[in-house]
């Protein structure tokens, strides 16, 4: 595994445009939320933009705005796969986010994953997916894609009696916090754990 810092990223409509190498991970743009030390396998498509909480500001005080997930860059048509087993609760075309799929994973706290800017969707509402099952293909649909090929991947959590909020996907990898975990065909045991939403080569 290696860690790479990708500098000089260009932000377009809230998503990063750039052409990083495989196995790269963009830096966090501020100290809020607390940056996570990310390690990503060399054979994994790169992360071009990290999660940002609402009202994120850089150390210089520049307002960045929120970014409720990770952006993963890969070629057009790359399979997008379920990061955990779940039920398809949304599969639709949105003007801003393009082709979008949302899975419910249940549990306590309850979790959801959302996959946007897809080129195509291969699942319908009500289907139950296994981890690693294809739900669509990577693309650049929707105005917020800014014409840049990428998957925008979100994780949502709702504690009992609480509100559903977006959380940093890096908190939930099967191998531990910040340890991007490629899908290998096996299911991690225990609490809600994620594998990468695109295949590693």
Image (cartoon, rainbow, N blue to C red):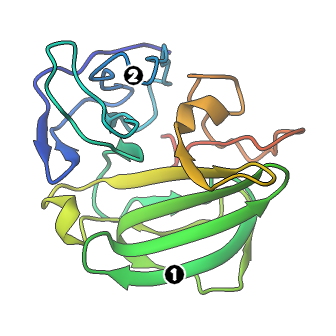
- In the rendered image, residue 75, in percent from the top left (x then y), is placed at 28, 54
Q: Residue at x 70, y 66 (%)?
A: 104
Residue 122: tell me if it is visible. no
Q: Residue at x 85, y 50 (%)?
A: 108
Residue 72, quarter of picture:
top left
Label 2 sits on a secondary structure element that is loop
Given this view, does label 1 or label 2 mark the residue nearer the observer?
2
Question: Seen in the image, is 168 located left or right of residue 97?
Answer: right
Residue ID for mark 2: 32
- In the rendered image, residue 140, in percent from the top left (x then y), is placed at 24, 65
Of 110 and 151, which appears nearest the observer? Answer: 110
- In the rendered image, residue 11, in percent from the top left (x then y), is placed at 13, 41
Q: Residue furthest front?
A: 161
Q: Dot 2 surroundings within 10 Å: few (below 14), some, or many (20 or more)?
A: some
Of 138 and 50, which appears nearest the observer? Answer: 50
Label 1 sits on a secondary structure element that is strand
The residues bearing labels 1 and 2 have C-alpha atoms spaced at a distance of 32 Å
Q: How many numbered marks are there?
A: 2
Residue 4, quarter of picture:
top left
Tag on residue 120? none
Residue ID for mark 1: 91
Residue 196: tell me if it is visible. yes
Residue 21, quarter of picture:
top left
Q: In this picture, is 172 found above or below 72?
A: above
Question: Seen in the image, is 66 located left or right of residue 124?
Answer: left
- In the rendered image, residue 197, in percent from the top left (x then y), is placed at 53, 50
Q: Residue at x 36, y 69 (%)?
A: 118
Q: In this picture, is 89 found above or below 118?
A: below
Question: Seen in the image, is 92 located left or right of residue 119?
Answer: right
Mark earlier in primary sequence (1, 2): 2
Q: In this picture, is 191 found above or below 39?
A: below
Q: Dot 1 surroundings within 10 Å: few (below 14), some, or many (20 or more)?
A: many
């Amino acid at each position: 595994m290696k860690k790479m810092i990708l500098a000089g990223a260009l932000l377009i409509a809230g998503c990063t445009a750039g052409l990083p190498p495989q196995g790269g991970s963009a830096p966090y743009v501020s100290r809020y939320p607390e940056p996570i030390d990310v390690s990503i396998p060399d054979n994994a498509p790169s992360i071009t933009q990290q999660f940002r909480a609402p009202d994120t500001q850089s150390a210089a005080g520049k307002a960045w705005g929120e970014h409720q997930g990770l952006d993963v860059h890969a070629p057009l048509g790359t399979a997008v796969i379920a990061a955990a087993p779940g039920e398809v609760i949304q599969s639709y075309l949105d003007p801003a986010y393009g082709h979008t799929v949302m899975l419910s994973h249940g549990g306590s706290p309850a979790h959801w994953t959302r996959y946007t800017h897809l080129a195509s969707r291969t699942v319908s509402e009500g289907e139950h997916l296994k981890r690693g099952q294809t739900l669509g293909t990577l693309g650049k649909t929707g105005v917020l894609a800014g014409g840049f090929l990428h998957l925008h991947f979100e994780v949502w959590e709702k504690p009992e009696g609480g509100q559903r909020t977006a959380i940093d996907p890096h908190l939930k990898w099967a191998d531990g916090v910040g340890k991007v975990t490629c899908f290998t065909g096996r299911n991690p045991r225990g609490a809600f754990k994620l594998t990468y939403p695109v295949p590693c080569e």
